[in-house]
Amino acid sequence: MKKVVNIPLGSQHISLLEPIRFQFTTENEKIIEVGADVGFVHRGIEKACSETFEWKKVGYVVARVCGLCAITHSLSYTLAVERLLGYEANERIKYLRMLMVELDRIHSHMLCLAHVSENAGFEAMFMQIMADRELVMDIQEAISGNRVQFDYIAIGGVNRDVTPELVNMIHKNLDELRPKIDDLMERFSNNWSLSLKYKGVGVLTLDEAYIYNALGPLARASGLKTDVRAESSDFPYEDVGYEMIFESSGDIYARNMVRLREIINSITMCENIIDNLPTGEIIEKVKGKPEGEVVVRVEAPRGELFYLVKGSRKNFLDRVRIKTPTFSAIPAMMEVFKGSEYADAPAILASFDPCMSCTAK
Amino acid sequence: MPIRKVEIRLEDMLDELTTFYDAKVWHFLTVNGIDLGDGKIELQWIFSKYGVKDETVLFSAVTAYETKVPSVVSLIPSATLSEREIVDMFGVEIEGAAKGLYLDEDSLTMPLRCSL
Amino acid sequence: MIKAMMQAFTNLFKPVHTVKYPFEEDVVLPKDYRGLIEYSEDDCIFCDKCEKACPPKSIVFYQHPDGSKEYKYNAWLCIYCGECVRACPKPGEALWQSEKKPLSATKEQDVNNEWFVWQRAAAESRENHAAMKKAAKEKKRQEKES
Ligand code: SF4
Ligand code: SF4
């Protein structure tokens, strides 16, 4: 007998970190319909950016959209404003900014992997990954002076320089991290609860990825070759050894693998950046007031982050439009849920690495 | 990133986008609204190209707040959330996009309209 | 599988990574940690640049009628960004960022309300002062004319 049951997941649920509510309509155990409510943590940041804070201060406001990818938010805003002011940063600034973004990607991906293993019932692994993640957090803290809110990027440059001791520390910690990630890679591909259980679960096919405009690791796991790092010329990513990483199966396993391999790639990039840091000023004076309209895209850990900034030579901007990665990934997520088992839902959700405070901003 | 801005009329928007949009070539970014004052709003549909450096296209249409805006969801299924966000923030009416993504369903505020 | 179990088991005997924070204060902060903002009234030239640069407005000056100003800093509103120090014409002398960690406020301290009161008072004092100045100017002009 067919029976249709409605099951809500969230807004508070043990597998969720942040409030989001999914409304699943299930038939026996299969999910056939999904509804999502994402606006629980709306803080009105777009409005604050154009009415409460002057343009020079907005960089600190948007950094608070998200705690994990604070650096990409302030970076995209800063890039947008710099372009409106007609300023281009020198190589050293670009490299330092790139370094922070890549470190951010490493620790964000590690957090996601930790949650994936936690939702597989693998508590010990969660603890271990979170402990190893401290290696990267320490580097970021030492570079920027704060653990979560880096406030590192300023209009016209970056706020602090890296010292020789820091370079040593970065090398030391990254060297320590690399074998651990290799080890994790083996765990994630050989361990039964992390690999076999996850193969073929939560599949997003390539066609669906195109139709629902998937992005970031979610798209790359389905074989959609999109990455803002390769699609914009803001940063010299090719020079530091960037390579696009993609899989083709589109399931949870593939997403884990994409993330793990991206961590390895990011470690390589960080080492290259640190070894080949160009010389130059770390901060330059930028004059004028923003005028015009500009679009900036930056690859955040979860995918593409988009900023549209419009100003008209006033102290307050006309519009700051923020489109965060998870916000655009939600339609694709809902598609993935359709047709899978309800029991898999928490695991699938964790593998998307959703960030609700980004989404509701 | 240089943006190619295409100005269109709102009535032609759906036709224009239908001829333009190919899911395998263009990545849909978002729908955006900008308050222009005097009861006018500029609506924007923004796309970027896969695999090509720095190519962003922005379709822009200026309209009054009272006009009913056609929805692009039939063409681009992932536009639902962005459209609902615009409905919430500006109080415009978009076909099939319900209010209540961030605000209450019956809320009367329109946070991003300058006059309010 | 067995390897993972082995590792989970050995992890049991490894030292803990966390600290019991308020009771056990051995958190190692890196050099140049961005901590509380400190101020020296003797060196300050009262240019108000720090006040204007601060994003959350956690530095506010109170204007006394005799022309002097009183500095007040809200350590719990501050985001430790360092903008004020960069804006200050005498960084390191009048205003600098220490490596001290901010302490958590208790309920008894009532930091929020106290701060709101202060903010309002400061804004009022500014207005009064400006009005006073204007009146004085006006008086002078009238005296000149008569
Ligand atoms: S550090 Fe930042 S938030 Fe704190 S007082 Fe200075 S400018 Fe204000
Ligand atoms: S910027 Fe420096 S000198 Fe000026 S008021 Fe502030 S502390 Fe004093």
Image (cartoon, rainbow, N blue to C red):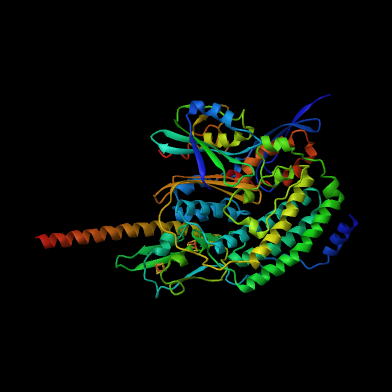
Location of residue B84 in the rendering, given as x and y in whole percent from the top left corner: 56, 34
Left or right of A43? Residue C144 is: left
Location of residue C137 in the rendering, given as x and y in whole percent from the top left corner: 20, 61
Q: Nearer the viewer, residue B37 or A29?
A: B37
Quarter residue A184 falls in: bottom right
Quarter residue C72 falls in: bottom left
* A346 lies above or below A284: above
Residue sitting at x 74%, y 62%: A132
Left or right of A83? Residue A327 is: right
Residue sitting at x 44%, y 38%: B35
In the orientation shown, which residue stands out farthest toward the right? C2
Residue sitting at x 33%, y 59%: C126
How many numbered marks, from 0 up?
0
Location of residue A192 in the rendering, given as x and y in whole percent from the top left corner: 87, 49
Quarter residue A211 falls in: top right
Q: Is residue B94 visible?
A: no
Location of residue A219 in the rendering, given as x and y in whole percent from the top left corner: 70, 43
Left or right of A25? Residue B59 is: left
Left or right of C73? Residue A232 is: right
* A280 lies above or below A234: below
Q: Nearer the viewer, residue A327 or A83?
A: A83
* C5 lies above or below A10: below
Residue sitting at x 56%, y 28%: B71
Q: Is residue C125 visible?
A: yes
The C terminus of chain B is located in which quarter? top left
In the orientation shown, which residue stands out farthest toward the left? C146
